[in-house]
Image: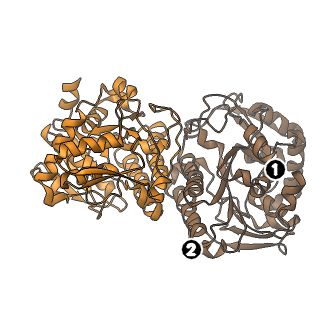
Chain colours: A orange, B brown
Amino acid sequence: MSADHRDFYRGRRVLVTGGLGFIGSNLCRTLADLGALVTAVDSLLPDYGGNLFNLAGYEDRVRINIADVRGHGMEYLVRGQEVLFNLAGQVSHIDSMTDPLTDLEINCTSQLKLLEAVRKGNPELKIVYAGTRQIYGRPLYLPVDEKHLLQPVDVNGINKISGEFYHLVYHQVHGIRASSLRLTNTYGPRQLIRHNRQGFIGWFVRKAVLGEEIPVFGDGSQRRDFNHVFDVVDAFLRAGAIDASDGQVLNLGDEHPVSLLDLAKLLVEVGGGGSYTLVPFPPERKRIDIGDFFADVSKARAVLGWAPSIPLRRGFEETVAYYREHREHYL
Amino acid sequence: MSADHRDFYRGRRVLVTGGLGFIGSNLCRTLADLGALVTAVDSLLPDYGGNLFNLAGYEDRVRINIADVRGHGMEYLVRGQEVLFNLAGQVSHIDSMTDPLTDLEINCTSQLKLLEAVRKGNPELKIVYAGTRQIYGRPLYLPVDEKHLLQPVDVNGINKISGEFYHLVYHQVHGIRASSLRLTNTYGPRQLIRHNRQGFIGWFVRKAVLGEEIPVFGDGSQRRDFNHVFDVVDAFLRAGAIDASDGQVLNLGDEHPVSLLDLAKLLVEVGGGGSYTLVPFPPERKRIDIGDFFADVSKARAVLGWAPSIPLRRGFEETVAYYREHREHYL
């Protein structure tokens, strides 16, 4: 299976929305390595994570198409494609509360337009959507499986539910071969680490890279699960290649959570300098914080044969080394 | 309590979106009778249910403001209001699949704009949102309580989830006093019965009024629960007057479901003529049909002191009589 799902992509026409972003660019690079004919669509909206350097060295093997998924053009871009990895999105919880209508346009309006384009122009297309564990809100039990209630705590969480459900309804009603991976905290190379509005993980990494003090909100006892982006890429590749994923939602994650305090300590060690400090929660973040979270990934294991494989320490060592080597592109 | 929650409205400034629609107009009439200062906002979009005749006789006591909730103007209209009953919406499941972007604009974009207007201009406003049992999809167990998974089967169900969640998040994050009633099949006077895209109930009533054959899809064994619109109005009045509803979602419904076949038989009796017939499910409806549904209403009973009170036979007798008396306005 492991070889099969990678062989599947040789010569395949694959479209990646958000292809210059963190996960999208890592996915495009791997797809190109596997011999796929890759088109990366990205709007390069400021502060969203798209970064041309993320495809450095792959400019000849990945077709880069700058376009806003909110606008026209997706009707053309989906034509003739065999797999769509649908990763374009507004991912900042904080921004979704200060500018909810932009979040709605990007995470809902554009998703519906894209699905309509697929339904009308390429209904055979296989789609894997990037969902998020954020839609579960504050867990009622741990680990959180896919049957957990959806209790979003911010507008971004609500709109990401819609984006996922649109895919599922287009599967049920129109037969579109769509599935969703519900991502947890993803880390690794090519992430946006310039500001802290897309979650704490990029910010922690930034501080470790710079040898600065890592601010941990509260007492740092909140436990979370983490996936290296290469493991996440592997899950997308599997979901795109495996028919059994059609119509499914699948948690990614790790059943061995780590407290934010322990993560900060690890990053200080890995960074070889710097420090961490406990700071009170800013009120606008406390209101949308979800406490402990880690995912039950047994369904992804069963359906995709997937499990996270990269140990946290090694993953962060390589991550910090990456940003230090390419700091002018990320800092 | 029963007297209290009605007394609450004397002299109150109350805004009703969708105020010329089925439930909205019945609510406006009762509010005016209770001495409230009522503004009914409605866009009178063709085929949506808004009908000027629904406020016949109340033109002097209800201020009618024609406006589209998607456009500007809500910032002004929410100012100075004390209670908002938020009933404007696209309610056709079928239309949401043929024109999903319009459903999104009306059920999501306009809801976010309205909540932003409230947050910025009148954060003390109490809001009751008209949710729907449609968001549960095909029940996993019966009766369905508010903890049931959300599994929408069409775009309308997805967007109605968002509309509800926006209200809850604005409550949690911004302190807006919002709640949602999840309505089941509502029947009674002032409903749209011209076409069958807003559900079977109006269509069944139309056929009974005209003495025509009632088409029952499948074998008619699907059980559903029904509320008379006056009972639904009573629930809205309670939710608007009672502080304990803030931040809550509450099922309406009836724990004594009736099969569609029995409902058709009842309507034939009540109509005093006509007939019913079993017809195969049209495929586009079968795909979004949810089978049996009836709601657990114990939470609404506990929080609001509400229970449905109008017996089905009497309710439909009066309903059929209403449409026969005013047929030129509804047929």
Q: Residues within 10 Å of mark 2 (few under 14, many from 20)?
A: some
Q: Secondary structure at mark 2?
A: loop
Quadrant containing the C terminus of chain B is bottom right
Residue nearest the viewer, comparing A209 with B302 = A209
Q: Position of residue B308 (x, y in %)?
A: 83, 42
- Tell me if residue A26 comes above or below residue B66 in the rendering: above
Disc 1/disc 2 C-alpha distance (Å): 32 Å
- Tell me if residue B35 comes above or below residue A170 in the rendering: below
Residue sitting at x 11%, y 50%: A58
Q: Position of residue A208 (x, y in %)?
A: 22, 50
Q: Position of residue A228 (x, y in %)?
A: 25, 39
Mark carried by residue B112: none
Q: Residues within 10 Å of mark 1 (few under 14, many from 20)?
A: many
Dots 1 and 2: beta carbons under 8 Å?
A: no
- Direction from residue A92 to residue A314 in the image, left or right: left
- Tell me if residue B82 comes above or below residue A305 in the rendering: below
Residue sitting at x 16%, y 46%: A272
Mark carried by residue B188: 1
Q: Position of residue A320 (x, y in %)?
A: 17, 47
Foreground mark, 1 or 2, reads 2
Q: How many marks?
A: 2
Q: Which residue is mark 2?
A: B72
